[in-house]
Image: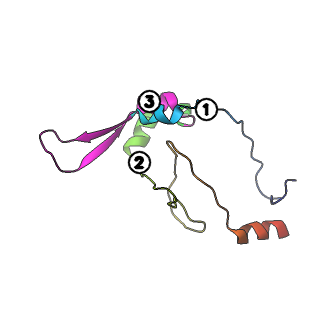
């Protein structure tokens, strides 16, 4: 058994698939800012091409395109700043997060790590 792994943890089976170097830029090419015509100021909205996500995103390409369209319609897009926290350990919310592009750092609290090593 791997060090730091709890005996009741599910076995994770995955295949590592190298992604193209420019995949982030290709996904970003599917994002469009929409502004109201004839107004210099005011709110804008973001349109995300379901076609681009379906073609390029390593996870979203596995679902039906109609499902992806519905998912985008019912979702919110959030942008994180550098070092901003997406989810804090112990928080209880009902959200699912899908990373469209970029990188996140996963941090496990030391208390949790030491509990697992003692079990």
Find the residue positioned furthest to the right: 1
Viewer-proximal residue among 86 and 95: 86
For the record, the magenta segment spans 31-59
Which quarter of the figure has residue 117? bottom right
Q: Residue at x 43, y 36 (%)?
A: 28
**85 sits to left or right of 37:** right
Distance of mark 2 from mark 3, alpha carbons? 17 Å
Distance of mark 2 from mark 1, alpha carbons? 25 Å
| Residue for badge 3 | 52
Could you say where residue 87 lies in the image, as x and y percent from the top left?
54, 61
Give the tally of numbered discs: 3
| Residue for badge 2 | 75
Earlier sequence position, callout 2 versus callout 1: 1
Q: Residues within 10 Å of mark 2 (few under 14, many from 20)?
A: few
Instruction: Give above or below for 22 relative to 8.
Output: above
Could you say where residue 45 lies in the image, as x and y percent from the top left?
29, 45
**113 sits to left or right of 102:** right
Is 2 contained in the magenta span?
Answer: no
Q: Residue at x 81, y 60 (%)?
A: 4
SS of the residue under disc 2: loop
């Amino acid at each position: 058994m791997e060090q730091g792994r709890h005996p009741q943890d599910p076995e994770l089976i995955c295949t590592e698939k190298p992604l193209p170097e420019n995949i982030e830029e290709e996904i970003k090419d599917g994002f469009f800012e929409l502004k109201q015509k004839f107004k210099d100021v005011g709110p804008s909205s973001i349109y995300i091409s379901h076609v681009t996500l379906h073609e390029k995103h390593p996870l979203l390409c596995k679902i039906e395109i109609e499902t992806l369209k519905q998912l985008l319609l019912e979702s919110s897009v959030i942008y994180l700043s550098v070092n901003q926290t997406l989810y804090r350990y112990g928080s209880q919310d009902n959200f699912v997060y899908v990373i469209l592009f970029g990188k996140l750092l996963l941090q496990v609290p030391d208390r949790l790590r030491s509990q697992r090593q003692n079990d």
